């Protein structure tokens, strides 16, 4: 496997940061609470106190030498969570047939599977780095990524892991297992997931799960081999196709409380029942147009992702709200649905990582984002969704911190060299586009 291009510098040495207080704007704690004059006190990578400025500053010992970060009115959020993403699709924009808002079978066959066959090791590395840059810019610090590169499989997840670790974010990585490229690639994909999951336990910021692409096309033999390789403890990142049958997958023990399911095709009553009984999480994404209002009433676990569409989680929530918004849908019920998606992300990420991802509270990891949004009207517990959906949906982050360490500040990356990454990516993307045109 090729190594990371030498022009891309490694991360600066990690050093123990001074305790810091971030204050000066409204604080959303990830659990539905808003503090209009919010603050968070951080020490040794953890949140010591969060709430109002008055309460937080009262927790700070007078003898402690602290750093202060004044947001100057900008809102403070926990790091966002993306439950379904494809880092590798960063070079898709501009290719024939690419439509991120189309999750159909035709889009998979005419674009997605051809695109994956074009990827080599260097393209994967650079596309991943671009995906990480874009995630950080939109305030995302935890990503569940589903990867495919049939011509570059061996240790590819380990390679992506090194980039994730360098950047400072955390991720759960998986490789798409399918039979569409023959038995040899199927077996190698299976082993890539198994070996990575076995070894990824050494990195607290990276985890693994088995990836399954268009599960309905997999034979009983394939599902049996996947189940045997996974054992009883692994979760599954599953992207459905038109041939949905979650009950069949559940019969092979592939649907459980640590599994993600996404897909743009209607779910039947049996599918909804399977999700409910298993505790698996269904992920809504902009490219997968379910138009299924039954999900608004369902008590299944749900979350939100971007599917590699080049947008952030806040914009994805805006798309999801507008998908169902109509005179026939009660506004309060729709608002509760959006809260359910946000809380679903927090709950699911907590199954894979310690440190309460997506939450700012005492003893949580200090994953904090300051968005460049100064609200002109008050932000309260009653109206914060309005600000989030219609005030912040396109707002970039101006500061991102993970585990108490700045990784992005004043629109500048501190762990990655954006200029060099984009320069090298232009070259890699041209090569990919040339290969794509020949297929």
Image (cartoon, rainbow, N blue to C red):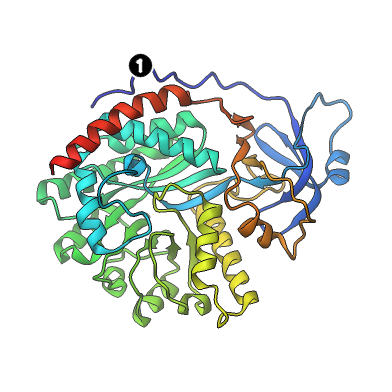
Residue at which label 1 appears: 6
- Callout 1: SS: loop
Q: Quadrant of the C terminus?
A: top left
Mark yes or no: residue 43 visible.
Answer: yes
Percent across and percent down for residue 223 are 21, 62
Residue 8 in the image: above or below residue 188: above
Q: Quadrant of the N terminus?
A: top left
Percent across and percent down for residue 254 are 31, 63
Residue 272 in the image: above or below residue 59: below
Residue 130 position by quadrant: top left
Percent across and percent down for residue 347 are 55, 58
378 or 364, which is in the foreground? 378
Q: Residue at x 15, y 46 (%)?
A: 185
Q: Residue at x 44, y 62 (%)?
A: 283
Residue 100 in the image: above or below residue 152: below
Q: Residue at x 43, y 65 (%)?
A: 282
Mark yes or no: residue 119 visible.
Answer: no
Q: Residue at x 43, y 76 (%)?
A: 292
Percent across and percent down for residue 26 are 76, 49
């Amino acid at each position: 496997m090729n190594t990371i291009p030498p022009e891309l510098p490694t991360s600066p040495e990690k050093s123990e940061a001074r305790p810091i207080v971030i204050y000066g704007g409204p604080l959303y704690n990830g659990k539905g609470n808003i503090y209009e004059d919010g603050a968070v006190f951080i020490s040794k990578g953890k949140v010591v106190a969060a709430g109002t400025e008055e309460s937080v500053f009262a927790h700070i010992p007078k003898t402690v030498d602290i750093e202060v970060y004044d947001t100057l009115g900008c809102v403070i959020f926990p790091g966002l969570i993306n439950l379904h993403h494809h880092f590798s699709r960063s070079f898709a924009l501009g290719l024939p047939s690419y439509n991120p808002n189309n999750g159909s079978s035709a889009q998979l066959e005419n674009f997605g599977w051809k695109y994956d066959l074009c990827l080599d090791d260097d393209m994967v590395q650079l596309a991943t780095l671009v995906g990480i840059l874009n995630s950080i810019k939109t305030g995302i610090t935890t990503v569940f990524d589903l990867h495919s590169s049939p011509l570059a499989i061996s240790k590819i997840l380990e390679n992506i892991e090194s980039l994730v670790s360098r950047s400072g974010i955390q991720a759960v990585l998986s490789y798409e297992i399918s039979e569409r490229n023959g038995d040899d690639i199927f077996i190698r994909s299976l082993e890539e997931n198994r070996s990575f999951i076995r070894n990824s336990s050494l990195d607290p910021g990276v985890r693994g799960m088995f990836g399954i692409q268009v599960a309905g096309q997999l034979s009983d033999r394939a599902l049996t081999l996947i189940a045997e390789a996974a054992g009883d403890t692994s979760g599954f990142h599953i992207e459905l196709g038109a041939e949905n049958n979650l009950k069949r997958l559940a019969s092979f023990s592939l649907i459980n409380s640590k599994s993600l399911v996404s897909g743009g095709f209607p779910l039947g009553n049996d599918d909804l029942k399977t999700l409910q009984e298993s505790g698996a999480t269904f992920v809504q994404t902009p490219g997968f147009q379910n138009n299924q209002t039954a999900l608004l009433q369902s008590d299944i676990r749900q979350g939100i992702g971007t599917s590699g569409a080049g947008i952030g989680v806040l914009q994805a929530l805006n798309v999801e709200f507008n998908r169902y918004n109509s005179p026939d849908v009660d506004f309060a019920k729709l608002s509760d649905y959006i809260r359910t998606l946000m809380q679903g992300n927090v709950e699911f990420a907590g199954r894979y990582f310690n440190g309460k991802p997506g939450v700012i509270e005492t003893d949580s990891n200090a994953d904090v984002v300051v968005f460049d949004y100064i609200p002109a009207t008050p932000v309260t517990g009653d109206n914060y969704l309005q600000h989030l959906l219609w005030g912040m949906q396109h707002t970039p982050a101006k500061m991102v911190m993970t585990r108490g360490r700045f990784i992005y500040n004043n629109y500048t990356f501190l762990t990655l060299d954006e200029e060099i990454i984009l320069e090298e990516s232009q070259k890699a993307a041209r090569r990919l586009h040339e290969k794509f045109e020949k297929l």
